[in-house]
Image: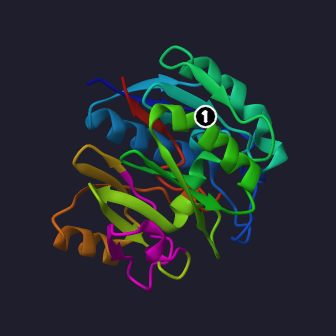
Amino acid sequence: MPRIALVREVSDSITRCELTHLAREPIDAARARAQHAAYRAALAGLGCELHEVAPLHDHPDAVFVEDCAVVVDGLAVITRPGAASRRGEVESVATVLARFRPLGRIEAGTLDGGDVLRVGRTLYVGMTPRTDAEGIAQLQALVAPLGYTVIAVPVTGCLHLKTGVGEVAPGLLLINPKWVDPAAFGGLDHLAVDPAEPMAANALRIGDTVVYPQAFPRTAARLAARGIRTVSVDAYELAKAEGGVTCCSVVFEV
């Protein structure tokens, strides 16, 4: 099946990004754009067909398109981000997704796409300052008719669920157990990040390959030991904006 990746260029205003758990550091916007270009090249190299979302240079976090949508078979759910400053980002993402899926919408409460981890027909949804019970309930109502189950997962210490856990192979989770309890995922197998690399759980699985930040070599070695193939990308400047490799795209099959 063709694989689509929605991406959006780095905004001129990224230095004014929202921050929750990180101290503000200077962000080199030119370097962030270069790293984002390499990220896009990695997606294309893995067979993704890139579709550009309209740039929003007055929205500092607009490069993080993942938070604007949750895409499942038969539906794209347009979110209502938990940071009010980001709600102007969603319509441009909806415009592109409407070419590929019917749209549903989170109309009240809040939901960030970065809090939604899809594993098969289950959507694990982080309970965080960016995603609340009302948003989770609306997501469940939208996807249940399509055969999806929604499970709420407590998260502590990080911005989004997918900051603390990601699927790196079918049924295998990469997880920071200090932020997300592995027991929340039932019988799924899991691999802990190296304790020296607490941010290392965010990983973007595309087929049998994982796009992975080069900043976490110890955890990358753990992945390699489990037979996980990775493509390394430099995402250091984007990480200063509390962004990870999943945040910068919406990837789905058509």
* For residue 10, side relative to residue 107 (left or right): left
Q: Looking at the picture, how far across and down is residue 70, in whole percent?
A: 55, 38
In the image, is 163 to the left or to the right of 209? right
Q: For the point 33% across and 69% down, which residue is it?
A: 187
**How many other residues sit within 10 Å of disc 1, few (<14), some (14-19) or many (≥20)?**
some
Residue 57 visible in image: no
Q: Does the rendering let one see residue 68? A: yes
Q: Locate residue 39: give its quadrant.
A: top left
Give the vertical position of 61 relative to 127 (above or below): above
* 203 in the magenta segment: yes
Give how far across and how far down residue 72 sits, in percent.
46, 34
Side (left or right) of 115 relative to 192: right
Q: Image height check: is 99 above or below 105? A: above
Relative to 149, say whether 198 is above or below: below
Which range of residues does the magenta coloring cover?
180-204
* Residue with the mark numbered 1: 142
- Kindly state the secondary structure of the residue where label 1 is placed: helix
